[in-house]
């Protein structure tokens, strides 16, 4: 290393670079042949991507893409490029930085393409009075437009007008009646125009009409079923109404959807997507009528009148059918593999090669996923647009050194070049984060991303990367693509429905718990020594050492072995019995335990382990969105306390992308909690487990209230405010203790309720199911009340922080004063001496 101008040492030799960054190089996946090139560019701060690539907007201006422009080709693993990070932040600081850092919001809005007016590309509104606009700006009258239709028909055929399109004309009822269209054009089969409820009677005079579009018509929106019934009754031969196939659809509709010439024997590609078809087993849809059919699209149709087996048998008979597009799950079942095995002649399913599907084992596939582009209104602030759109661009890492790993992740947005890389399942480039430490230590670290070609790339090719590199179906790859793309909602909704059915099938109380409660009625014996000598307690908790003062117990030296003690009381799980308690204290195990025992009780919010139940969560999200329900969720890491790495969001992409920061559960947020003076609060109960067999569980009479510091709000900006949505403020933020008796009195006055009744309901929700038959333990159980004062179980904490219980005296709801200094004396008396001072059995 060489000294810099400030007396510090900087890496100047390649050998030093490799020595310091060896692990980072290996983790990045960068080929060793490019390590020296990377060293040169990092030490010289060379950003030469602009000389090789160009960024261009897509046709709609909603995103950008990256093209290779420097040479005829770029060979595989021949170059490595540095990509700067345009924005790096902790999630809690995101909104504040966008507001306060000069130029940041403007740059991010431009990079994410949210700085445009969504209507800016709309065509200029033209004033059309009884006429239709032409490209040269002239306008034809209604009568001139009809003469034009007749002239066109004569040029291409026998002069018979079979397609009449008047939807761009501003025709009032009197003008429409005066045209006498049904007499002048008796052979019209397709009619497209803007109609009122009154001249609808005139439309039914077209006896040969097969297709009718009533475009942009408020009558259709307000009286759709009434108008449709009237039209269908008056036009018995109608096969298509407003793009949907009617119950009478047949050869004419199939010919129209197959290209418009209506000669079925020549139709090779048939697009029946989104036609609201309920029954496809009709005479016209057969190999005899459609002998040349090679591509069929039946997406977006319910087809509920046909069984899977019958549909597959019909499709199997088409001799030339090679390509099929269909919803999966859908009318042909829930598995792409099953469909291909039933239709072995298919070479392509939903745009993907059949052999590739069979090789990868993917059951749900779709090659035409639409990008999940952000939506906003003209009035929405730019910062809000960015917060919504950023999940399509963010990447993440977490810092660590020899001693510990950061508790929260770092998120970042690559610069304009890196952010223009779009997704491809078969990419030609790869990107990885890289932490360069020019002085050989973490204090000097600067973060970059590195980019290199993984395939031979030709000039003009789009440069792409795999957003989910290294993540296969065993890690729910297809479901995770929902963060960036509109994936098939039907599949996820079905997964959610199956999940709900499974939970509903569970009994109210598990058989194992029922049997344990009835197996024995005797009480667990205390563990006194025969000679009444003190019980030796091994502990690593300062509060136990300080406040366990009863003569029946003696604290042994911390350096002693746990095996020498009668009682081991630690903050860690030291034996198998204690480890089994993880079924409650790890958040994903808590939800699984409750689901197995109770199904889906009202006192537990809908909860999903994202590592195993992402599809079910996405289905729940889609159902709520469809039904207009609240969609606010809270993400919690499996096994962290004090709300570390916990996030509140209503953004599906955000939920899925958070999986990259470690295992998490996603739980429905209690959007309307009971409030205390306008602030959110929860209740920390202390549960003592003396025995499982026989079942002996006690609730300490000591509980406390945890208050948020800020007034509660559902404003989106508030989701980034820790002190608005989280109540654990004794580790961060401003801590303000509220004495329990004072809280009870003020709460009763504010809400005009009796706290004791609420307390008893809440206590009933903290009944834990434990698997350990021997261990005795203390648990913190957190409960929140909704606006109806119904309790919701939040989480369970093993060996909770009981500082407040020891520090503050309180009043029991029934039973008088409780001294804080006696808290652990009462706890140990209950668990080991069979006492019930200041505890209540559950």
Image (tube, grey):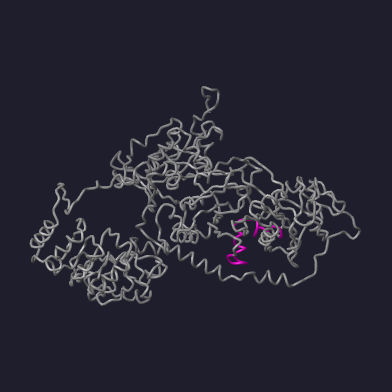
Q: Is residue 599 magenta?
A: yes
Magenta stretch, overall SS? helix
Q: Nearer the viewer, residue 411 or 141?
A: 141
210 is higher (above) or lower (below) than 147: below
Q: Nearer the viewer, residue 148 or 588?
A: 148
Image coords of residue 426 (percent x, y): 38, 53
Image coords of residue 591 (percent x, y): 60, 60
Residue sitting at 54 percent across and 42 percent down?
92
Image coords of residue 89 (percent x, y): 50, 39
Q: Nearer the viewer, residue 667 or 491?
A: 667
Whether residue 580 appears in this view of the structure is no
Q: Nearer the viewer, residue 372 or 425?
A: 372
Residues in magenta, as a range: 577-600
| Quarter of the figure with residue 296 | bottom left
How many marks on residues?
0
| Quarter of the figure with residue 52 | top left
Q: Is residue 516 magenta?
A: no
Image coords of residue 835 (percent x, y): 82, 59
Q: Residue furthest right?
A: 531
Whether residue 60 appears in this view of the structure is yes
Locate residue 241 relative to residue 528 in the image: left or right.
Answer: left
Quarter of the picture holding the C terminus: bottom right
Residue sitting at 80 percent across and 69 percent down?
522
265 is higher (above) or lower (below) than 782: below
617 is higher (above) or lower (below) than 466: below
Q: Residue furthest front?
A: 174
Locate residue 333 relative to residue 176 in the image: left or right.
Answer: right
Residue sitting at 11 percent across and 56 percent down?
144
């Amino acid at each position: 290393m060489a000294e810099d101008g400030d007396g510090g040492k900087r890496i100047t030799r390649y050998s030093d670079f490799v020595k310091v960054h060896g692990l980072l190089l290996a983790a990045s996946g960068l080929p060793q042949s490019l390590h020296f090139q990377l060293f040169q560019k990092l030490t010289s701060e060379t950003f030469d991507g602009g000389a090789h690539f160009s960024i261009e907007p897509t046709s709609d201006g909603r995103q950008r893409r990256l093209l290779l422009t420097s040479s005829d080709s770029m060979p595989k693993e021949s170059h490595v490029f540095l990509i700067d990070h345009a924005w790096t932040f902790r999630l809690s600081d995101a909104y504040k930085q966008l507001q306060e850092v000069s130029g940041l919001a403007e740059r991010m809005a431009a990079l994410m393409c949210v700085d445009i007016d969504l209507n800016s590309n709309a065509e200029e509104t033209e004033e059309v009075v009884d006429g239709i606009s032409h490209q040269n700006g002239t306008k034809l009258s209604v009568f001139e437009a009809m003469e034009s239709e007749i002239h066109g028909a004569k040029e291409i055929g026998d002069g018979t007008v079979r397609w009449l399109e008047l939807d761009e004309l501003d025709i009032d009822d009197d003008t429409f009646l005066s045209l006498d269209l049904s007499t002048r054009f008796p052979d019209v089969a397709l009619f497209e125009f803007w109609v009122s409820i009154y001249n609808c009677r005139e439309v039914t005079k077209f006896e040969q009409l097969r297709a009718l579009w009533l475009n942009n018509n408020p009558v259709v929106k307000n009286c759709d079923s009434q108008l449709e019934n009237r039209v269908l009754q008056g036009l018995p031969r109608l096969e298509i109404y407003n793009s949907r196939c009617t119950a009478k659809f047949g050869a004419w509709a199939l010919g129209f959807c197959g290209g418009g010439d209506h000669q079925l024997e020549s139709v090779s590609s048939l697009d029946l997507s989104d036609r609201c078809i309920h029954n496809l087993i009709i005479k016209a849809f057969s190999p005899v009528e459609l002998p040349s059919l090679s591509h069929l699209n039946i997406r977006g149709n319910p087809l509920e009148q046909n069984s899977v087996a019958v549909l597959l048998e019909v499709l199997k008979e088409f001799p030339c059918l090679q390509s099929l597009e269909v919803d999966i799950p859908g009318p042909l079942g829930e598995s792409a593999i099953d469909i291909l095995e039933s239709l072995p002649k298919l070479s392509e399913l939903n745009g993907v090669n059949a052999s590739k599907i069979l090789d990868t084992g993917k059951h749900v596939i779709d090659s035409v996923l639409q990008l999940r582009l952000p939506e906003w209104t003209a009035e929405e602030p730019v910062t809000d647009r960015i917060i919504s759109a950023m999940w399509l661009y963010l990447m993440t890492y977490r810092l660590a050194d020899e001693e510990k790993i950061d508790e929260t992740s770092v998120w970042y947005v690559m610069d304009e070049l890196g952010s223009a890389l779009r997704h491809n399942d078969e990419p030609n480039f790869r990107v990885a984060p890289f932490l360069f430490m020019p002085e050989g230590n973490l204090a000097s670290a600067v973060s970059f991303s590195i980019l290199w070609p993984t395939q031979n790339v030709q000039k003009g090719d789009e440069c792409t990367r795999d957003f989910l590199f290294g993540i296969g179906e065993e890690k729910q790859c297809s479901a995770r693509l929902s963060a960036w793309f509109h994936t098939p909602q039907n599949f996820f909704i079905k997964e959610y429905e199956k999940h709900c059915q499974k939970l509903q099938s569970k009994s109210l109380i598990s058989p194992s718990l029922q049997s344990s409660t009835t197996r024995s009625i005797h009480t667990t014996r205390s563990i006194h020594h025969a000679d009444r000598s003190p019980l030796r307690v091994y502990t690593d908790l300062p509060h136990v050492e300080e406040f366990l003062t009863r003569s029946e117990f003696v604290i042994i030296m911390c350096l002693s072995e746990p095996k020498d003690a009668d009682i081991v009381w630690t903050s860690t799980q030291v034996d198998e019995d204690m480890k089994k308690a993880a079924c409650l204290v790890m958040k994903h195990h808590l939800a699984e335990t409750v689901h197995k025992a109770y199904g889906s009780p009202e006192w537990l919010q809908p909860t999903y382990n994202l590592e195993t139940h992402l599809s079910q969560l996405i289905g729940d999200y889609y159902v709520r969105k469809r039904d207009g329900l609240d969609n606010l969720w809270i993400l919690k890491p499996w096994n962290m306390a004090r709300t570390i790495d916990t996030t509140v969001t209503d953004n599906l992409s955000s939920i899925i992308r958070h999986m990259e920061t470690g295992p998490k559960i996603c739980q429905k947020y209690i959007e309307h909690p009971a409030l205390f003076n306008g602030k959110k609060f929860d209740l920390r109960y202390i549960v003592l487990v003396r025995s499982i067999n026989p079942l002996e569980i006690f609730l300490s009479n000591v509980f406390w209230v945890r208050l948020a510091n800020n007034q509660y709000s559902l404003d989106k900006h508030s989701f980034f405010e820790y002190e608005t949505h989280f109540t654990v403020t004794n580790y961060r933020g401003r801590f303000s203790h509220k004495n329990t008796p004072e809280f009870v009195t003020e709460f009763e006055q504010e809400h005009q309720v009796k706290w004791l009744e609420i307390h008893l309901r809440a206590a009933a929700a903290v009944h834990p199911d434990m698997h350990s038959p021997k261990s005795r333990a203390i648990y913190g159980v957190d409960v929140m009340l909704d606006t109806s004062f119904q309790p919701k179980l939040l989480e369970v904490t093993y060996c909770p922080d009981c500082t407040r219980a020891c520090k503050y005296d309180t009043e029991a709801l029934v039973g008088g004063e409780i001294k804080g200094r006696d808290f652990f004396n009462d706890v140990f008396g209950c668990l080991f001496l069979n006492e019930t001072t200041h505890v209540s059995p559950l």
